[in-house]
Amino acid sequence: MKQTNQPKYSNAKWHKRFITWPLEGLAAWVLVNTLKLIPIDTASNLTGNIARRLGPCLPVSNRARNNLQNCFPNWTKTYIETVLSDMW
C-alpha cells in the first residue's frame, strides 16, 4: 500500500489558503477593531443595518421563504416578505 503525505488543506486551492482566507481575516480584524473605536450603540445600529440589508440576499432567506410558504399556504406573498424582513 502506497502512502502519500497530503498537505493539511489539500482540498483547498492555493489561492484560498494564501490569498482569500488571509484577506477575509484581515477584513474581519479591521471591522472589529474599527467598531471598537465607536460607541457601542452606534456600532450595534451600524451592524444591525448591515445585517438587515445583506440578510435577505443570503440563501437561508430562500429556505425560510420556502418553509413559510409550505407551512402557511394561506399567507400572501407580501405577508411572507414582511415576516422575512422582520426576521432580519
Image: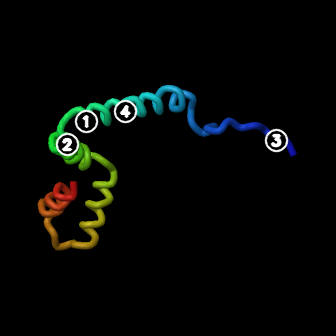
The amino acid sitting under disc 4 is: Trp
The amino acid sitting under disc 2 is: Ile
Left or right: 8 with respect to 33? right
Q: How far apart are marks 3 and 4 (CA)?
A: 39 Å
Left or right: 58 with respect to 52? right
Q: How far apart are marks 2 and 3 (CA)?
A: 54 Å
> Who's the residue at 41% across and 33% down the image?
24
Res 40 seen here: yes
Q: Which of marks 2 and 3 is nearer the N terminus?
A: 3
Name the residue carrying label 1: 35
Name the residue carrying label 3: 3
* Marks 3 and 1 in Cβ contact (< 8 Å): no
Q: Distance between the residues labelled 4 and 1?
A: 10 Å
Percent coordinates x, y for residue 62 in the rendering: 29, 55
Name the residue carrying label 2: 40
Q: Which of marks 4 and 1 is nearer the N terminus?
A: 4
Percent coordinates x, y for residue 56 in the rendering: 24, 49
Q: Which of marks 2 and 3 is in front?
A: 2
SS label for mark 4: helix
Name the residue carrying label 4: 29
Q: Residue 19 carries which label?
A: none
Q: Which of marks 3 and 4 is nearer the N terminus?
A: 3
